[in-house]
Image (cartoon, rainbow, N blue to C red):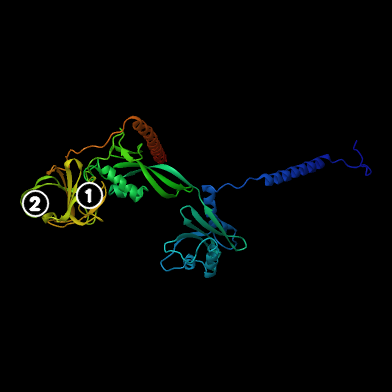
Protein backbone atom coordinates (compact mmCIF):
# COMPACT_ATOMS: atom_id res chain seq x y z
CA UNK A 1 0.00 0.00 0.00
CA UNK A 2 1.39 3.39 -1.03
CA UNK A 3 2.10 5.77 1.80
CA UNK A 4 0.04 8.96 1.67
CA UNK A 5 1.69 12.37 1.58
CA UNK A 6 1.13 14.34 4.75
CA UNK A 7 2.04 18.04 4.39
CA UNK A 8 2.30 18.41 8.17
CA UNK A 9 5.30 16.03 8.32
CA UNK A 10 8.69 17.40 7.27
CA UNK A 11 10.29 15.53 4.37
CA UNK A 12 13.63 13.83 5.24
CA UNK A 13 15.96 14.20 2.23
CA UNK A 14 19.14 12.96 3.82
CA UNK A 15 21.33 12.48 0.77
CA UNK A 16 21.25 16.09 -0.48
CA UNK A 17 21.80 17.37 3.04
CA UNK A 18 24.74 15.04 3.62
CA UNK A 19 26.29 16.10 0.33
CA UNK A 20 25.87 19.76 1.17
CA UNK A 21 27.45 19.23 4.58
CA UNK A 22 30.38 17.37 3.12
CA UNK A 23 30.94 20.11 0.55
CA UNK A 24 30.92 22.73 3.29
CA UNK A 25 33.49 20.83 5.33
CA UNK A 26 35.65 20.39 2.25
CA UNK A 27 35.48 24.10 1.50
CA UNK A 28 36.46 24.92 5.07
CA UNK A 29 39.34 22.44 4.87
CA UNK A 30 40.56 23.88 1.57
CA UNK A 31 40.29 27.39 2.90
CA UNK A 32 42.24 26.43 6.00
CA UNK A 33 44.86 24.76 3.84
CA UNK A 34 45.24 27.77 1.57
CA UNK A 35 45.46 30.11 4.52
CA UNK A 36 48.04 27.93 6.18
CA UNK A 37 50.09 27.62 2.99
CA UNK A 38 50.16 31.37 2.49
CA UNK A 39 51.19 31.88 6.09
CA UNK A 40 54.16 29.51 6.10
CA UNK A 41 55.25 29.78 2.45
CA UNK A 42 59.06 29.99 2.32
CA UNK A 43 60.94 32.60 0.30
CA UNK A 44 61.16 31.79 -3.40
CA UNK A 45 64.38 29.97 -4.33
CA UNK A 46 66.62 31.28 -7.14
CA UNK A 47 65.36 30.56 -10.62
CA UNK A 48 66.55 27.35 -12.17
CA UNK A 49 67.65 26.90 -15.77
CA UNK A 50 64.24 25.58 -16.83
CA UNK A 51 62.44 28.47 -15.12
CA UNK A 52 64.74 31.02 -16.74
CA UNK A 53 64.18 29.48 -20.15
CA UNK A 54 60.42 29.52 -19.52
CA UNK A 55 60.46 33.19 -18.59
CA UNK A 56 62.51 34.08 -21.63
CA UNK A 57 60.08 32.13 -23.77
CA UNK A 58 57.09 33.84 -22.14
CA UNK A 59 57.46 36.81 -24.45
CA UNK A 60 56.81 34.51 -27.37
CA UNK A 61 53.91 32.54 -25.86
CA UNK A 62 51.90 35.40 -24.36
CA UNK A 63 50.64 36.19 -27.84
CA UNK A 64 48.02 33.47 -27.68
CA UNK A 65 46.03 35.80 -25.44
CA UNK A 66 46.22 38.65 -27.97
CA UNK A 67 42.90 38.77 -29.84
CA UNK A 68 43.00 39.36 -33.56
CA UNK A 69 46.66 38.39 -33.95
CA UNK A 70 48.34 35.25 -35.22
CA UNK A 71 51.03 33.39 -33.30
CA UNK A 72 54.21 35.46 -33.05
CA UNK A 73 57.34 34.98 -35.08
CA UNK A 74 60.78 35.15 -33.52
CA UNK A 75 62.80 37.84 -35.29
CA UNK A 76 66.55 37.98 -34.47
CA UNK A 77 67.88 41.55 -34.63
CA UNK A 78 71.39 42.99 -34.30
CA UNK A 79 72.02 46.70 -33.80
CA UNK A 80 73.83 48.18 -36.80
CA UNK A 81 76.64 50.77 -36.62
CA UNK A 82 75.17 54.24 -35.97
CA UNK A 83 71.71 52.81 -35.29
CA UNK A 84 69.61 53.57 -32.21
CA UNK A 85 68.00 50.81 -30.19
CA UNK A 86 64.57 52.16 -31.10
CA UNK A 87 65.38 51.93 -34.80
CA UNK A 88 66.65 48.38 -34.36
CA UNK A 89 63.42 47.33 -32.61
CA UNK A 90 61.38 49.03 -35.31
CA UNK A 91 63.39 47.14 -37.95
CA UNK A 92 61.91 43.93 -36.52
CA UNK A 93 58.66 44.99 -38.26
CA UNK A 94 56.70 46.84 -35.58
CA UNK A 95 55.34 50.43 -35.54
CA UNK A 96 57.45 53.27 -34.19
CA UNK A 97 55.22 53.86 -31.14
CA UNK A 98 55.58 50.23 -30.04
CA UNK A 99 59.34 50.35 -30.53
CA UNK A 100 59.45 53.53 -28.47
CA UNK A 101 57.35 51.92 -25.73
CA UNK A 102 59.63 48.87 -25.61
CA UNK A 103 62.81 50.98 -25.40
CA UNK A 104 61.28 53.16 -22.67
CA UNK A 105 60.51 50.04 -20.63
CA UNK A 106 64.01 48.64 -21.23
CA UNK A 107 65.39 51.94 -19.97
CA UNK A 108 64.28 50.99 -16.46
CA UNK A 109 66.94 48.27 -16.40
CA UNK A 110 69.70 49.36 -18.81
CA UNK A 111 71.27 52.26 -20.67
CA UNK A 112 69.35 52.37 -23.93
CA UNK A 113 71.20 55.40 -25.32
CA UNK A 114 74.89 54.45 -25.25
CA UNK A 115 74.62 51.07 -26.91
CA UNK A 116 77.22 49.39 -29.08
CA UNK A 117 76.78 48.07 -32.59
CA UNK A 118 76.36 44.31 -32.59
CA UNK A 119 74.02 44.17 -29.58
CA UNK A 120 71.67 41.28 -30.34
CA UNK A 121 68.13 40.51 -29.21
CA UNK A 122 65.11 38.45 -30.23
CA UNK A 123 61.79 40.17 -30.86
CA UNK A 124 58.46 38.33 -30.84
CA UNK A 125 56.28 39.95 -33.52
CA UNK A 126 52.63 39.00 -34.19
CA UNK A 127 50.93 39.76 -37.49
CA UNK A 128 47.22 40.65 -37.51
CA UNK A 129 44.91 37.94 -38.76
CA UNK A 130 44.09 38.59 -42.37
CA UNK A 131 47.33 40.60 -42.77
CA UNK A 132 45.46 43.86 -42.28
CA UNK A 133 46.89 46.53 -40.03
CA UNK A 134 50.29 46.91 -38.36
CA UNK A 135 52.14 44.10 -36.63
CA UNK A 136 52.44 44.05 -32.85
CA UNK A 137 55.45 43.60 -30.60
CA UNK A 138 54.54 40.81 -28.22
CA UNK A 139 57.83 40.44 -26.40
CA UNK A 140 61.57 40.90 -26.48
CA UNK A 141 64.48 38.98 -24.97
CA UNK A 142 68.00 40.37 -24.65
CA UNK A 143 71.16 39.08 -22.94
CA UNK A 144 72.87 41.96 -21.12
CA UNK A 145 75.76 40.01 -19.62
CA UNK A 146 77.29 36.53 -19.47
CA UNK A 147 74.66 35.41 -16.95
CA UNK A 148 72.15 38.27 -17.14
CA UNK A 149 69.19 38.81 -19.44
CA UNK A 150 66.12 41.03 -19.77
CA UNK A 151 62.72 39.92 -21.01
CA UNK A 152 59.74 42.04 -22.03
CA UNK A 153 56.28 40.53 -22.38
CA UNK A 154 52.99 42.24 -23.20
CA UNK A 155 50.14 41.98 -20.67
CA UNK A 156 46.41 41.83 -21.47
CA UNK A 157 46.02 45.60 -21.12
CA UNK A 158 48.76 46.23 -23.70
CA UNK A 159 51.46 47.29 -21.22
CA UNK A 160 54.98 45.86 -21.31
CA UNK A 161 56.17 43.89 -18.28
CA UNK A 162 59.92 43.88 -17.59
CA UNK A 163 61.79 41.00 -16.00
CA UNK A 164 65.49 40.94 -15.15
CA UNK A 165 67.02 37.50 -14.73
CA UNK A 166 70.38 36.41 -13.38
CA UNK A 167 71.54 32.84 -13.74
CA UNK A 168 73.75 31.00 -11.33
CA UNK A 169 77.29 30.31 -12.50
CA UNK A 170 79.03 27.09 -11.62
CA UNK A 171 82.57 25.80 -12.07
CA UNK A 172 83.07 22.48 -13.79
CA UNK A 173 85.59 20.37 -15.66
CA UNK A 174 84.52 19.29 -19.11
CA UNK A 175 85.76 16.61 -21.49
CA UNK A 176 85.93 17.70 -25.14
CA UNK A 177 86.72 15.39 -28.07
CA UNK A 178 87.43 16.38 -31.65
CA UNK A 179 89.22 15.60 -34.87
CA UNK A 180 92.11 17.38 -36.54
CA UNK A 181 90.79 19.56 -39.35
CA UNK A 182 93.31 22.17 -40.39
CA UNK A 183 95.83 23.00 -37.66
CA UNK A 184 95.69 21.72 -34.08
CA UNK A 185 95.19 25.35 -33.01
CA UNK A 186 92.04 25.73 -35.13
CA UNK A 187 90.68 22.30 -34.16
CA UNK A 188 91.06 22.89 -30.42
CA UNK A 189 89.52 26.37 -30.65
CA UNK A 190 86.41 24.88 -32.24
CA UNK A 191 85.87 22.77 -29.10
CA UNK A 192 85.65 25.86 -26.92
CA UNK A 193 89.24 26.23 -25.75
CA UNK A 194 90.31 29.87 -25.45
CA UNK A 195 93.37 31.23 -27.25
CA UNK A 196 95.78 31.01 -24.31
CA UNK A 197 94.75 27.42 -23.61
CA UNK A 198 95.22 26.46 -27.26
CA UNK A 199 98.66 28.11 -27.37
CA UNK A 200 99.61 26.17 -24.25
CA UNK A 201 98.37 22.94 -25.80
CA UNK A 202 100.31 23.53 -29.02
CA UNK A 203 103.49 24.24 -27.03
CA UNK A 204 103.12 21.04 -25.03
CA UNK A 205 102.54 18.81 -28.04
CA UNK A 206 105.40 20.51 -29.88
CA UNK A 207 107.76 18.67 -27.50
CA UNK A 208 106.62 15.27 -28.75
CA UNK A 209 104.79 15.75 -32.05
CA UNK A 210 106.05 16.82 -35.46
CA UNK A 211 103.00 18.72 -36.68
CA UNK A 212 103.97 18.14 -40.30
CA UNK A 213 104.64 14.39 -40.27
CA UNK A 214 102.79 13.04 -37.22
CA UNK A 215 99.35 14.69 -37.44
CA UNK A 216 96.86 13.81 -40.16
CA UNK A 217 93.35 15.11 -40.85
CA UNK A 218 90.82 13.03 -38.91
CA UNK A 219 93.15 12.19 -36.01
CA UNK A 220 91.24 12.24 -32.71
CA UNK A 221 92.30 14.38 -29.76
CA UNK A 222 90.85 14.95 -26.29
CA UNK A 223 90.98 17.83 -23.84
CA UNK A 224 89.85 18.25 -20.23
CA UNK A 225 89.63 21.85 -19.08
CA UNK A 226 88.00 24.03 -16.44
CA UNK A 227 85.21 26.40 -17.34
CA UNK A 228 82.53 28.60 -15.81
CA UNK A 229 79.06 27.80 -17.14
CA UNK A 230 75.59 29.26 -16.60
CA UNK A 231 72.52 27.21 -15.68
CA UNK A 232 71.32 27.38 -19.27
CA UNK A 233 74.58 25.84 -20.50
CA UNK A 234 76.41 28.93 -21.78
CA UNK A 235 80.19 28.92 -21.25
CA UNK A 236 81.32 32.35 -20.08
CA UNK A 237 84.94 31.62 -19.17
CA UNK A 238 87.47 28.85 -19.69
CA UNK A 239 90.31 28.15 -17.32
CA UNK A 240 93.19 25.72 -17.00
CA UNK A 241 93.91 22.88 -19.39
CA UNK A 242 93.97 19.80 -17.12
CA UNK A 243 94.59 17.05 -19.69
CA UNK A 244 95.17 16.54 -23.41
CA UNK A 245 95.80 13.50 -25.58
CA UNK A 246 96.61 12.91 -29.24
CA UNK A 247 98.27 10.07 -31.18
CA UNK A 248 98.67 8.08 -27.96
CA UNK A 249 100.51 10.95 -26.25
CA UNK A 250 98.93 12.18 -23.02
CA UNK A 251 99.80 14.90 -20.56
CA UNK A 252 98.33 15.92 -17.21
CA UNK A 253 98.50 19.23 -15.39
CA UNK A 254 99.95 18.96 -11.88
CA UNK A 255 100.90 21.56 -9.26
CA UNK A 256 104.08 20.56 -7.44
CA UNK A 257 104.75 21.10 -3.74
CA UNK A 258 106.70 24.27 -4.50
CA UNK A 259 103.65 25.75 -6.25
CA UNK A 260 105.05 25.37 -9.76
CA UNK A 261 102.57 24.07 -12.35
CA UNK A 262 103.96 21.59 -14.88
CA UNK A 263 102.64 18.96 -17.28
CA UNK A 264 103.57 15.29 -17.00
CA UNK A 265 102.99 12.13 -19.01
CA UNK A 266 101.15 9.10 -17.61
CA UNK A 267 104.27 7.88 -15.77
CA UNK A 268 104.91 11.19 -14.00
CA UNK A 269 107.67 12.35 -16.33
CA UNK A 270 107.73 16.04 -17.23
CA UNK A 271 106.46 16.26 -20.79
CA UNK A 272 108.37 19.50 -21.32
CA UNK A 273 111.38 18.49 -23.39
CA UNK A 274 114.53 20.52 -23.62
CA UNK A 275 113.78 21.79 -27.14
CA UNK A 276 110.60 21.91 -29.22
CA UNK A 277 110.52 19.75 -32.33
CA UNK A 278 108.52 22.34 -34.26
CA UNK A 279 109.02 26.05 -33.48
CA UNK A 280 106.13 27.21 -35.70
CA UNK A 281 102.51 26.00 -35.47
CA UNK A 282 100.66 24.61 -38.47
CA UNK A 283 103.78 24.48 -40.65
CA UNK A 284 104.87 21.63 -42.90
CA UNK A 285 108.44 20.49 -43.38
CA UNK A 286 109.52 21.40 -46.91
CA UNK A 287 113.22 20.53 -46.80
CA UNK A 288 115.23 18.18 -44.59
CA UNK A 289 118.74 18.21 -43.16
CA UNK A 290 121.45 16.93 -45.56
CA UNK A 291 122.72 17.25 -49.10
CA UNK A 292 120.30 18.78 -51.59
CA UNK A 293 120.19 20.75 -54.81
CA UNK A 294 120.09 24.41 -53.82
CA UNK A 295 116.91 26.00 -55.22
CA UNK A 296 118.69 29.26 -56.13
CA UNK A 297 122.35 28.36 -56.74
CA UNK A 298 121.45 25.27 -58.77
CA UNK A 299 124.11 22.86 -57.44
CA UNK A 300 124.26 20.31 -54.60
CA UNK A 301 125.01 21.79 -51.23
CA UNK A 302 124.71 20.74 -47.59
CA UNK A 303 121.45 21.94 -46.04
CA UNK A 304 122.38 22.40 -42.39
CA UNK A 305 118.90 22.73 -40.99
CA UNK A 306 115.26 22.01 -41.83
CA UNK A 307 112.73 24.27 -43.53
CA UNK A 308 109.11 24.76 -42.51
CA UNK A 309 106.69 26.21 -45.06
CA UNK A 310 104.32 28.75 -43.51
CA UNK A 311 102.61 31.97 -44.46
CA UNK A 312 104.45 35.24 -44.07
CA UNK A 313 103.84 36.67 -40.60
CA UNK A 314 103.24 33.30 -38.90
CA UNK A 315 104.61 33.49 -35.31
CA UNK A 316 107.90 31.70 -34.58
CA UNK A 317 108.44 30.58 -30.98
CA UNK A 318 111.60 29.87 -29.03
CA UNK A 319 112.46 26.17 -29.06
CA UNK A 320 113.70 26.36 -25.47
CA UNK A 321 114.64 28.61 -22.57
CA UNK A 322 117.76 30.66 -23.22
CA UNK A 323 119.41 33.96 -24.06
CA UNK A 324 119.37 35.77 -27.42
CA UNK A 325 122.90 35.82 -28.85
CA UNK A 326 122.26 37.31 -32.29
CA UNK A 327 119.42 39.23 -33.89
CA UNK A 328 120.80 40.68 -37.11
CA UNK A 329 121.06 40.46 -40.86
CA UNK A 330 123.31 37.54 -41.93
CA UNK A 331 123.95 37.13 -45.65
CA UNK A 332 121.70 34.65 -47.43
CA UNK A 333 119.95 33.86 -44.12
CA UNK A 334 118.35 37.31 -44.22
CA UNK A 335 117.00 38.31 -40.82
CA UNK A 336 118.69 35.84 -38.49
CA UNK A 337 118.15 35.00 -34.81
CA UNK A 338 120.30 32.74 -32.62
CA UNK A 339 119.50 31.64 -29.06
CA UNK A 340 121.94 30.02 -26.61
CA UNK A 341 120.51 27.30 -24.34
CA UNK A 342 122.10 25.32 -21.50
CA UNK A 343 124.23 22.22 -22.06
CA UNK A 344 126.06 23.61 -25.10
CA UNK A 345 122.95 23.82 -27.31
CA UNK A 346 121.94 26.72 -29.58
CA UNK A 347 119.09 27.20 -32.03
CA UNK A 348 118.97 29.40 -35.13
CA UNK A 349 116.06 30.90 -37.09
CA UNK A 350 116.46 32.42 -40.58
CA UNK A 351 114.58 34.33 -43.34
CA UNK A 352 112.47 36.12 -40.71
CA UNK A 353 110.19 38.97 -41.73
CA UNK A 354 110.65 40.72 -38.38
CA UNK A 355 111.56 40.05 -34.75
CA UNK A 356 109.27 39.75 -31.79
CA UNK A 357 108.65 42.67 -29.46
CA UNK A 358 111.77 43.59 -27.49
CA UNK A 359 113.93 40.81 -28.97
CA UNK A 360 117.60 41.83 -28.91
CA UNK A 361 120.97 40.30 -27.91
CA UNK A 362 121.22 39.62 -24.18
CA UNK A 363 117.47 39.21 -23.70
CA UNK A 364 116.41 36.13 -21.72
CA UNK A 365 113.48 34.27 -23.27
CA UNK A 366 111.34 31.28 -22.31
CA UNK A 367 110.31 28.23 -24.30
CA UNK A 368 107.27 28.91 -26.48
CA UNK A 369 107.69 32.70 -26.37
CA UNK A 370 107.07 34.43 -29.71
CA UNK A 371 110.50 35.61 -30.90
CA UNK A 372 109.94 36.38 -34.58
CA UNK A 373 107.67 35.97 -37.61
CA UNK A 374 108.05 33.90 -40.78
CA UNK A 375 109.28 35.78 -43.81
CA UNK A 376 111.32 35.45 -47.04
CA UNK A 377 114.34 37.67 -46.42
CA UNK A 378 117.77 36.74 -47.78
CA UNK A 379 118.28 33.95 -50.33
CA UNK A 380 114.74 32.59 -50.27
CA UNK A 381 112.23 31.48 -52.90
CA UNK A 382 109.20 32.08 -50.68
CA UNK A 383 108.07 32.53 -47.06
CA UNK A 384 109.40 29.79 -44.80
CA UNK A 385 111.40 29.25 -41.60
CA UNK A 386 114.90 27.80 -41.76
CA UNK A 387 115.57 26.17 -38.36
CA UNK A 388 118.92 24.92 -37.04
CA UNK A 389 120.22 23.23 -33.89
CA UNK A 390 123.86 23.65 -32.85
CA UNK A 391 125.58 21.39 -30.29
CA UNK A 392 128.95 22.56 -28.98
CA UNK A 393 129.37 24.81 -32.01
CA UNK A 394 128.47 22.17 -34.62
CA UNK A 395 125.20 21.96 -36.56
CA UNK A 396 123.22 18.73 -35.96
CA UNK A 397 120.05 17.32 -37.51
CA UNK A 398 117.08 18.83 -35.62
CA UNK A 399 114.97 15.73 -36.35
CA UNK A 400 117.29 13.23 -34.69
CA UNK A 401 119.11 15.45 -32.18
CA UNK A 402 119.41 13.84 -28.74
CA UNK A 403 118.48 16.52 -26.24
CA UNK A 404 118.09 16.31 -22.43
CA UNK A 405 114.77 15.17 -20.99
CA UNK A 406 112.66 16.71 -18.23
CA UNK A 407 112.31 15.82 -14.54
CA UNK A 408 110.46 12.79 -13.13
CA UNK A 409 108.12 12.89 -10.11
CA UNK A 410 108.88 10.69 -7.09
CA UNK A 411 107.72 10.02 -3.54
CA UNK A 412 104.74 11.97 -2.18
CA UNK A 413 104.50 14.09 -5.33
CA UNK A 414 104.22 10.98 -7.50
CA UNK A 415 101.48 9.55 -5.24
CA UNK A 416 99.50 12.81 -5.42
CA UNK A 417 99.95 12.93 -9.18
CA UNK A 418 98.69 9.37 -9.59
CA UNK A 419 95.56 10.13 -7.56
CA UNK A 420 94.82 13.18 -9.70
CA UNK A 421 95.56 11.21 -12.88
CA UNK A 422 93.13 8.45 -11.84
CA UNK A 423 90.34 11.02 -11.40
CA UNK A 424 90.97 12.53 -14.85
CA UNK A 425 91.15 9.06 -16.43
CA UNK A 426 87.74 8.16 -14.98
CA UNK A 427 86.25 11.32 -16.47
CA UNK A 428 87.74 10.66 -19.90
CA UNK A 429 86.76 6.98 -19.90
CA UNK A 430 83.24 7.76 -18.72
CA UNK A 431 82.77 10.26 -21.52
CA UNK A 432 84.16 7.74 -24.02
CA UNK A 433 81.74 5.05 -22.78
CA UNK A 434 78.80 7.46 -23.09
CA UNK A 435 79.85 8.39 -26.61
CA UNK A 436 80.18 4.71 -27.50
CA UNK A 437 76.71 3.91 -26.18
CA UNK A 438 75.27 6.85 -28.14
CA UNK A 439 76.91 5.64 -31.37
CA UNK A 440 75.74 2.07 -30.68
CA UNK A 441 72.16 3.22 -30.05
CA UNK A 442 72.19 5.34 -33.20
CA UNK A 443 73.45 2.40 -35.25
CA UNK A 444 70.76 0.12 -33.77
CA UNK A 445 68.02 2.62 -34.58
CA UNK A 446 69.37 3.07 -38.10
CA UNK A 447 69.34 -0.71 -38.67
CA UNK A 448 65.81 -0.95 -37.31
CA UNK A 449 64.65 1.73 -39.72
CA UNK A 450 66.40 -0.05 -42.57
CA UNK A 451 64.81 -3.41 -41.72
CA UNK A 452 61.39 -1.81 -41.37
CA UNK A 453 61.83 -0.29 -44.79
CA UNK A 454 62.74 -3.64 -46.35
CA UNK A 455 59.67 -5.32 -44.84
CA UNK A 456 57.25 -2.88 -46.43
Q: Contact (CB < 8 A) between labels 2 and 1?
A: no
- Res 70 quadrant in image: bottom right
Q: Which residue is mark 2?
A: 294
Q: Is residue 135 among the parts visible in the rendering? A: no
> Where's the C terminus, which quadrant?
top left
User: Is residue 397 something one can see in this rendering?
Assistant: yes
Q: Position of residue 380 (x, y in %)?
A: 13, 56
Instruction: Write down the residue under mark 1.
Output: 283
Total marks placed? 2
Residue 397, x across and y down, in percent? 14, 42
Q: Earlier in the sequence, mark 2 or mark 1?
A: 1
Residue, far right: 8
As helix, strand or loop, the secondary structure at mark 1 comes to loop
From the viewer's side, name the closer residue of 5 and 100. Answer: 100
Residue in the picture at 92% in, 40% down: 4
The local secondary structure at tag 2 comes to: loop
Residue 334 placement (x, y as % from top left): 14, 56
Crowding around mark 2 (Cα neighbors within 10 Å: few <14, some 14 to 19, many 20+) is few
> Marks 2 and 1, how far apart in space?
21 Å
Residue 46 spot, x, y in % from top left: 56, 48
Amino acid sequence: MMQEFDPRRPTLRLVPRLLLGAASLAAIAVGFKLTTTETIAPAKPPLGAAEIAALQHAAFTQSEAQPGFARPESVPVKVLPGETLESAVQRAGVPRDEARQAVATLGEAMDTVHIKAGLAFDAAVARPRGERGPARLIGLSMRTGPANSITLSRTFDGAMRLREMEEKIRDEQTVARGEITGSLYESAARLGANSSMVVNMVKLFAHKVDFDRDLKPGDDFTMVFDRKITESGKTIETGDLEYAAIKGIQFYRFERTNGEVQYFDESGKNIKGFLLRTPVDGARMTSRFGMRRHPILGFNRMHQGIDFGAGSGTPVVAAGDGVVVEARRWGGYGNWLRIRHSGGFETGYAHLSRYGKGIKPGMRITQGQVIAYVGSTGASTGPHLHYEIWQHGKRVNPVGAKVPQGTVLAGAELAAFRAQKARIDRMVQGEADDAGETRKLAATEANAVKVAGLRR
